[in-house]
Amino acid sequence: MSVKKGRQTYVNDRGVYIRETAAIVGPREKAGPLGDCFDEVRPEDWGEKTWEKAEAKFICAAFHKLMGKTDRKTEDIDCVLAGDLMNQCTASSIGLKDSNAPYLGLFGACSTIAEGMCIASFLINSGGMDNVVCMASSNFCSAEKTYRTPVEQGGQRPPTSQWTVTAAGGLWLSSEPGGPEITSVTVGRIVDFNITDSNNMGAAMAPAAADTIMTHMSDLNRTPDYYDAVITGDLGITGSGILREITGLSESVHMDCGAMIFDPVKQRTNSGGSGCGCGTAVLSCCFYPKLIRGEMKKILFVATGALMSPVSVMQSESISGIAHAVAIEI
């Protein structure tokens, strides 16, 4: 059973291990600084008539890529936890409908992969499940027309805006020893600083990330230097600066997947990457291999999300932030 420590953190007393990962990305992500890390690259539309169908194809392919890298069968999966940015997690449900695996759809905005890892940790720690797959995806064009304006309208992008990552990825979590271990998780709170600009999600998410990180450290009586890196999911350049200002984290300790995945100058991505697929792909194909190779021993992965929707925007609601933390150690 997970043991609660402090206000929001749960320490595993049964081993939860990341046995394998996979991620498939779009051309812009492949052309970025981390391009050589990813398993596969595909066109953003993947030959489909809609961006939404293309995203479903990404998550379907990522699932099969993950399965192909393991020696397991679909029947070995106790549950797939997956989510995306579309209404009712449409990409995940369509992409995984032929998987024949038990499925739970999740929505935590861009924090979805960490939400899934937290829940999987609880399920495996309880003894009820042994093998859980966590997945998340996003697509630039489908996200833009859902949360801002369709790309075809040619809207101007301010410096604080981020480029939604086209990617889908997954992690196989298991009670079977081997690979990096999830030692604890911290479930985040909803934090709202009355940010209303959908082109400045870093500012909306940074306070939530700070809250979760500081709570995690307080609950476990740790300091950030316990970890080789504190890695946020997609604060981007703007949000990362705000986070460091709030928490005092140094640039040598804090890393952000959204700030890493693109070259903001050469690729004109302004404040960097965002989306469910951002943190998922970078964790799966950049940081997981570093842990396997022993280049890192302990990381705190903090996926961040802006809890907005077309409904909340039309009703003039501010953008709430959420962040969940997963401590991963070798």
Image (tube, rainbow, N blue to C red):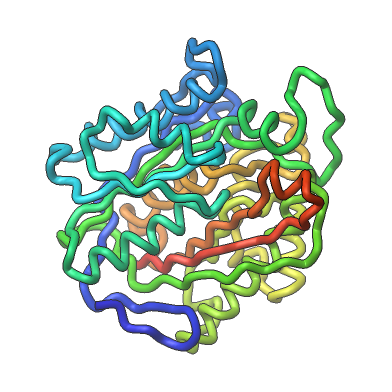
Q: Is residue 260 shown above or below 120?
A: above
310 or 73, which is in the foreground? 310
- Percent x, y of residue 78: 19, 50
- Residue at (38, 51) in percent of width and height: 288
Residue at figure coordinates x 37%, y 84% from the top left: 4
> Would you say 311 lies left or right of 196 here?
left
Q: Is residue 156 left or right of residue 285?
A: right
Residue 324, how many percent across, how many down?
A: 51, 65
Residue 330 in view, yes or no: no
Counting the numbered discs, the total is 0
Position in image of residue 295 (x %, y %)? 40, 58
Q: Is residue 318 above or below residue 82?
A: below
In screen coordinates, is 7 left or right of 99? right
- Camera sees residue 326: yes
Q: Residue sitting at 72 percent across and 54 percent down?
A: 202
The residue depicted at 22 percent of the width and 32 percent of the height is 68
Residue 180 at x, y = what percent?
A: 30, 60
